[in-house]
Image (cartoon, helix red, strand yellow):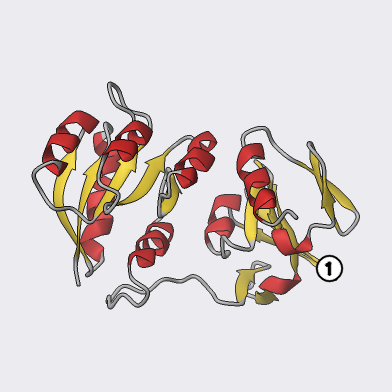
Amino acid sequence: MKFKCIIVDDEPPATRILEKYVEKVSFLEKVGVFNDSLTALAFLNSNNVDVIFLDIQMPQLTGLQLSKIISKDIKVIFTTAYPDFALEGFELNAIDYLLKPIAFERFYQAVSKLNSSPKSEVQTNTPTDFIFIKTDGKNKFSKIFLTDILYVESLQNYVCVHTSSDQFITHSSLKNVLESLPKNDFIQIHKSYVISLKQIQSTDSFSVFINNKELPIGATYKDTFFARIEENKI
């Protein structure tokens, strides 16, 4: 089965990237690209569409406003450069929320939710229960089980993966590491920290405590983080 999709974004470079990504996925079919919400709405009123890749910040009619008035049968995947809108996006039952710049692996992870077993030639590189990271200049790779990770710390052009028994430093960005981790178990709480939700000992309005280490919660990430906390509150 192919899912008919449209792209709605007022930034042409962003639409071109999404078009390339859609072409790589065998179960997606692009049927329209629009640079404003009103033109997209007119198209949706007379055409059948399964999925909409929807930018949030747009003039006249925002992506959030458009998502509230289109058919509930249309699946929405929000795309934006502003993480502050994530919570509201999920409250509108969006399938996923992609933060620009969007990596293909993250894009594929989102569209895979459209079908429990999509048949595509494209494969994701997201691991199931472990990752390998290069830990020195001699092509040595260390295997780290996801259940052992406490948190990941950004160190400018490097990241440090903290486990209960060791630390692993590799040349990478926090964004790249986050995209390799299952989003159900890991979340970014600060520009410098990604944490394992399973390893949290306690939290307050400003900090998370893991393995007796206090980690700050950045203002940009606070709403999304505490929304996850609310999901498991009793």
Instruction: Name the residue that disc number 1 marks.
Output: 164
Label 1: few (<14), some (14–19) or many (≥20) C-alpha neighbours in 10 Å: few
Is 150 drawn above or below residue 145 in the view shown? above
Is 30 drawn above or below residue 56 in the view shown? below
Q: Is residue 41 left or right of residue 141?
A: left
Q: Could you tell me which residue is drawn at 20 percent across and 72 percent down? A: 1
Q: Foreground residue, 18 or 230?
A: 230
Q: Is residue 101 left or right of residue 182?
A: left
Helix or strand or loop: what does disc 1 sit on?
A: loop
| Residue sitting at the far top | 60
Q: In which quarter of the image is residue 24?
A: bottom left
Q: In which quarter of the image is residue 35?
A: top left
Q: In this view, does 41 lie to the left or right of 139?
A: left
Q: Could you tell me which residue is drawn at 40 percent across and 59 percent down? A: 110
Q: Is residue 210 visible?
A: yes
Q: In this view, does 106 lie to the left or right of 147?
A: left
Q: Foreground residue, 160 or 17?
A: 17
| Residue sitting at the far right | 212
Is 150 drawn above or below residue 14 in the view shown? below
Q: Could you tell me which residue is drawn at 75 percent across and 55 percent down? A: 234
| Residue sitting at the far front | 234
Q: Could you tell me which residue is drawn at 37 percent across and 29 percent down? A: 57
Q: Can residue 156 be seen in this view?
A: no
Whole-percent x, y for residue 104 in the image = 37, 58
Whole-percent x, y for residue 214 in the image = 86, 47
Whole-percent x, y for residue 100 in the image = 42, 43
Q: Foreground residue, 72 or 102?
A: 72
Whole-percent x, y for residue 195 in the image = 70, 55
Q: Which amino acid does label 1 sit on?
A: Ser
| Residue sitting at the far left | 46
Is 46 drawn above or below residue 171 in the view shown? above
